[in-house]
Image (tube, helix red, strand yellow):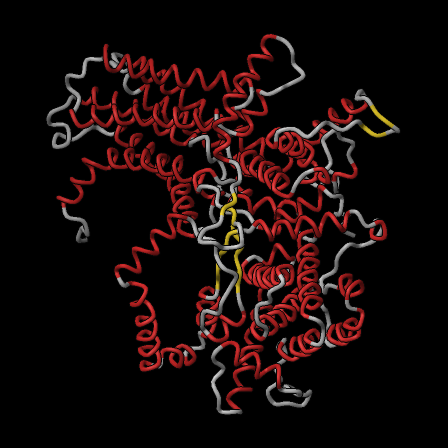
C-alpha cells in the first residue's frame, strides 16, 4: 500500500510535533487569559467563538502533547532526529515539558467553565488529573537516574498538579449540587446572625446606604439562594441591607451589575478557590516554585547537549507561565470581590484598619469600572458608555424589527448615542467615500441576486429556511441602554411595588391585561376576542401581535414635541424590537418555542406581500406600506384567500386602529406600559439558571429587569 505521506513530511512532523504542540498550547492559554474576560462584556459571536475554540483546543492540545511525549520517551530515538543530542538528555527535557502541559490543563484563573454544564464535569477532570499524573511520573522515571533537570521538573510538577487541582475544585464548587449545599449552609449562618441583630418592631434595623460594591456583594450572598431555588424572593429573607426604594436608578443599576458580575465569577472562574485561605497559600507555592525552577534551570543546569531551540522554547514556557500568573494576580487584586473582602468598617483592630486602607486604594482603581453615561452631538439621550475593557456586561439592547425583515430595508430607529471612537471612525469612512460606496454595493448585490434567480434556486431545493435565517439576522440592531429607558423601567417597577392593590395577586400577564384594565378598559373586549381565536394564547402570540401593532403605529405617526410622549413612543419601539429579538434568538428566556415565531413572521409577511400584489403596488417606503395597511378597513376577512394560519397582521391592524383613536400621549403611554408588563412577565417566568447563563455572553436587559423585580419583592413562586 502506498504511503500517503512522503518521508519528508513524516520527518518534519517527527522533528516538530512536540515543539509545535507545546507552543500552540501556550498560545491558547494566552488567548484565554486575554479574551475570556471580554465575553461578559459583549455578545459578539466572533469573540465568543474565539474563546470557545481556544477553550476546547486548550485541553486537547495539552492531552495530545502528553501523549506524544509518552510515546517519544518510550520508543528508542532514531539517529536522524537526535544526531546532535544524547537520548537521555532529550528525554529529560521531554519529561520537563510534560509538567508544563499539566500546568496548561489547569487553565487560567479567569475561565474554568465555558458553559454552566462544564461545571458538572469536575469528576471527569479529576480522573484526567490522575491519568496525567501517572503519565508524567512514568515519563520522569524513564529519565532516572542522572536527570540534570530533576529539581526543576519536581518543582514544575508540583505547580502543574496544584493548577489542575484548583480548576477541578472550582468546577466542583460551582456544580449545581455543591453550589446549592454551600448556599444553604450560608443561608443558615445568615439566619443565625440576623437573630442577633438589633430589631425595631420585629424588623431588622437597616444599614445606611453604602458603597455600591459593598451593597452589591452583600446582596449577592442573599441572591445565591434565589439562584439555586432555595427561596423564591428576597421577601422570604430577613436582611439588614438598605431597601431598593432608597436607591437612585443609576445606583440600582450599578448594584445589579455587581451582583451579576459575581454570578459570572463564581460559576465560570476560580474566584471561589483563589479568594480562600487555601487558594492564597497554593498561589504563593505555585509562583515561588515557578521562580525557583527558572532560577535553577538558568543558573545550575548544564545545557550542553540540549538543542538550542529547545532551550529557547523552555525559557518561553517559563516566562509565559510567570507572565500569565502575574496577569491573573492583578485581575484577582482588582476584582470587586477583593475590595469587599478587605473592607470592613466595623473592624477597628489594626489589621482591620490596614485592610480598609488597602480597600480605599483599590477603590480608586475600581472607579474605572463604574457605569458611565454620556451623550454626543447634542443628542437628548444619555447612553451607557462604560469602556469596553471595564464593562461588567454588554450594556446594549438588541432588537429585531418585523418591518425591516419584511421590506428588507433600514427603517429609522431610536438615535444611537455614539462614542468618540465611533464618531472618528465615521469621519474616516466619510472622508474615504466608503459611506457612498456601500449603498451602491447593496444595490448591485440585489441586482445580481435577481439576475441569477438565487431565491428561486433556493426555493427549488426547498431551502427557504436559509433565506429566513439570513433576513432575520440582517434585521438585528444593537443599541446602547439609555439612561431614560432604565429610568422608565425602574420607575414602573418601583410604582408597581408601591401599589397596595397588587400586593397579593399577579403583577403582570403575557397580554398586557393589567395595563389595559388600568388605562384602557375599552381595549379589553378586543383583546379577549383576539385571544379567543387561538388555542393557546401564549407570550409568543402576544409579542408577535403587539410588535406588529407597535410597528404600524410607530411608522404612521410623526415625532411629537412633548418630551414625555416622545420618550414613551421610543421606549415602545425599543422594547417591542427587544422582545421579538428574545423570541427569535433566545426563546428559552421566554419559555417558548422558536418555530411558532418563525411561522408567525413568515405568514404575516406573506399576507402583507399578497395584499400589495393584489393592488399592483410596492410596499415601499415603510411609512407608505404601514399607511396602506391601516387605511384598508377590511384587510382580511375570515374567508379571504390571503388569510394565513399564523398571520398576526389582521389582529395587529385591528388593535392599532383602536389605539389610533386615542390621544397621542395616552396611546403611547398604554403601548409602553403594555411592553413593560410583557417584559416583566417574561422575566419572572424565566428560570433563575437561564438568567445566570446569559451573564457569560454579554448579559440581557430582561435579566436586569428580573433582578430589579426581585429586589422590589415582585416575584412570587410559580405554580
As displayed, is residue 641 above or below residue 483?
A: below
User: Residue 438: in sight, yes or no?
Assistant: yes
Viewed as shown, does residue 663 lie left or right of 374? right
Tell me what residue is drawn at x 23 percent, y 11 percent.
Answer: 299
- In the image, residue 298 sits, relative to residue 189, either above or below, namely above
Question: Residue 287 falls in which quadrant of the image?
Answer: top left
Residue at point 54%, 16% (across, down): 357
Position of 14 with respect to 509 (left or right) is left
Q: Find residue 410 and report its image quarter.
A: bottom left
Quick check: 403 above or below 94? below
Position of residue 445 measured from the top left corner of the image (x, y, whole percent): 32, 73
What x and y, as percent, mark residue 423? Answer: 38, 53
In percent of the image, x 63 and y 75: which residue is there? 648
Q: Position of residue 71 (x, y in %)?
A: 29, 32
Q: Is residue 580 visible?
A: no
Residue shown at 32% from the left, 67% from the top: 438
Is 80 positioned to the left or the right of 662 in the image?
A: left
Q: Is residue 531 above or below residue 39?
A: below
Amino acid at each position: 500500500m502506498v504511503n500517503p505521506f512522503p518521508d519528508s513530511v513524516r520527518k518534519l512532523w517527527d522533528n516538530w510535533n512536540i515543539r509545535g504542540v507545546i507552543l500552540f498550547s501556550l498560545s491558547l492559554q494566552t488567548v484565554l487569559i486575554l479574551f475570556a474576560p471580554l465575553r461578559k462584556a459583549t455578545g459578539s459571536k466572533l469573540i465568543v467563538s474565539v474563546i470557545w475554540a481556544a477553550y476546547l483546543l486548550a485541553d486537547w492540545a495539552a492531552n495530545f502533547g502528553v501523549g506524544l511525549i509518552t510515546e517519544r520517551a518510550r520508543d528508542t530515538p532514531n539517529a536522524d532526529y537526535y544526531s546532535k543530542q544524547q537520548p537521555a538528555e532529550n528525554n529529560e527535557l521531554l519529561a520537563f515539558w510534560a509538567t508544563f502541559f499539566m500546568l496548561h490543563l489547569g487553565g487560567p484563573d479567569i475561565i474554568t467553565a465555558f458553559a454552566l454544564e462544564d461545571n458538572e464535569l469536575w469528576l471527569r477532570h479529576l480522573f484526567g488529573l490522575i491519568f496525567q499524573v501517572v503519565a508524567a511520573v512514568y515519563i520522569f522515571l524513564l529519565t532516572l537516574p542522572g536527570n540534570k533537570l530533576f529539581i526543576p521538573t519536581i518543582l514544575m510538577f508540583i505547580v502543574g498538579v496544584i493548577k489542575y487541582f484548583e480548576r477541578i475544585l472550582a468546577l466542583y464548587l460551582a456544580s449545581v449540587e455543591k453550589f446549592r449545599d454551600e448556599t444553604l449552609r450560608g443561608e443558615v449562618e445568615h439566619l443565625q446572625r440576623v437573630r442577633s441583630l438589633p430589631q425595631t418592631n420585629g424588623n431588622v434595623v437597616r444599614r445606611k446606604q453604602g458603597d455600591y460594591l459593598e451593597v452589591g456583594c452583600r446582596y449577592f450572598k442573599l441572591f445565591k439562594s434565589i439562584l439555586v431555588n432555595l427561596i423564591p424572593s428576597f421577601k422570604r429573607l430577613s436582611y439588614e441591607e438598605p431597601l431598593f426604594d432608597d436607591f437612585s436608578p443609576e445606583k440600582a443599576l450599578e448594584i445589579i451589575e455587581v451582583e451579576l458580575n459575581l454570578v459570572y465569577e463564581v460559576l465560570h472562574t476560580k474566584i471561589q478557590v483563589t479568594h480562600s485561605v487555601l487558594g492564597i497559600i497554593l498561589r504563593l507555592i505555585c509562583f515561588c516554585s515557578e521562580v525557583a525552577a527558572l532560577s535553577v534551570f538558568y543558573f545550575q543546569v548544564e545545557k550542553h547537549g540540549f538543542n538550542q531551540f529547545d532551550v529557547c522554547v523552555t525559557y518561553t514556557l517559563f516566562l509565559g507561565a510567570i507572565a500569565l500568573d502575574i496577569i491573573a494576580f492583578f485581575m484577582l487584586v482588582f476584582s470587586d470581590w477583593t475590595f469587599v473582602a478587605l473592607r470592613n468598617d466595623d473592624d477597628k483592630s489594626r489589621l482591620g484598619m490596614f485592610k480598609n486602607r488597602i480597600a480605599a486604594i483599590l477603590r480608586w482603581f475600581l472607579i474605572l469600572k463604574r457605569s458611565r453615561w454620556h451623550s454626543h452631538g447634542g443628542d437628548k439621550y444619555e447612553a451607557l458608555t462604560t469602556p469596553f475593557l471595564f464593562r461588567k456586561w454588554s450594556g446594549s439592547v438588541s432588537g429585531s424589527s418585523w418591518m425591516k425583515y419584511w421590506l428588507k430595508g433600514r427603517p429609522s430607529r431610536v438615535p444611537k448615542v455614539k462614542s468618540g471612537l465611533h464618531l472618528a471612525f465615521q469621519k474616516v469612512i466619510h472622508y474615504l467615500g466608503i459611506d457612498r460606496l456601500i449603498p451602491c454595493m447593496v444595490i448591485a448585490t440585489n441586482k445580481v441576486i435577481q439576475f441569477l434567480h438565487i431565491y428561486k434556486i433556493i426555493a427549488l431545493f426547498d431551502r427557504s429556511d436559509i433565506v429566513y435565517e439570513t433576513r432575520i439576522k440582517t434585521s438585528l440592531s444593537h443599541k446602547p441602554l439609555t439612561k431614560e429607558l432604565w429610568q422608565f423601567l425602574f420607575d414602573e417597577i418601583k410604582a408597581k411595588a408601591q401599589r397596595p392593590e397588587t400586593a397579593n395577586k399577579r403583577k403582570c400577564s403575557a397580554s398586557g391585561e393589567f395595563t389595559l384594565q388600568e388605562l384602557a378598559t375599552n381595549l379589553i373586549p378586543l383583546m379577549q376576542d383576539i385571544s379567543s381565536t387561538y388555542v393557546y394564547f401564549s407570550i409568543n402570540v402576544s409579542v408577535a401581535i403587539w410588535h406588529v401593532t407597535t410597528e404600524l403605529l410607530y411608522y404612521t405617526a410623526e415625532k411629537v414635541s412633548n418630551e414625555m410622549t416622545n420618550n414613551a413612543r421610543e421606549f415602545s419601539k425599543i422594547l417591542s424590537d427587544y422582545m421579538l429579538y428574545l423570541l427569535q434568538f433566545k426563546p428559552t428566556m421566554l419559555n417558548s418555542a422558536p418555530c411558532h415565531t418563525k411561522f408567525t413572521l413568515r405568514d404575516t409577511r406573506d399576507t402583507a406581500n399578497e395584499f400589495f400584489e393584489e393592488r399592483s403596488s410596492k410596499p415601499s417606503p415603510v411609512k407608505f406600506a404601514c399607511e396602506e395597511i391601516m387605511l384598508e378597513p377590511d384587510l382580511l376577512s375570515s374567508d379571504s384567500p390571503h388569510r394565513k394560519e399564523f398571520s398576526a397582521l389582521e389582529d395587529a391592524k385591528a388593535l392599532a386602529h383602536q389605539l389610533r383613536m386615542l390621544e397621542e400621549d395616552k396611546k403611547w403611554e398604554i403601548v409602553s406600559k403594555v411592553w413593560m408588563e410583557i417584559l416583566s412577565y417574561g422575566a419572572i417566568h424565566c428560570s433563575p439558571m437561564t438568567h445566570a447563563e446569559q451573564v457569560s455572553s454579554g448579559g440581557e436587559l430582561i435579566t436586569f429587569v428580573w433582578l430589579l423585580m426581585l429586589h422590589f419583592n415582585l416575584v412570587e413562586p410559580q405554580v
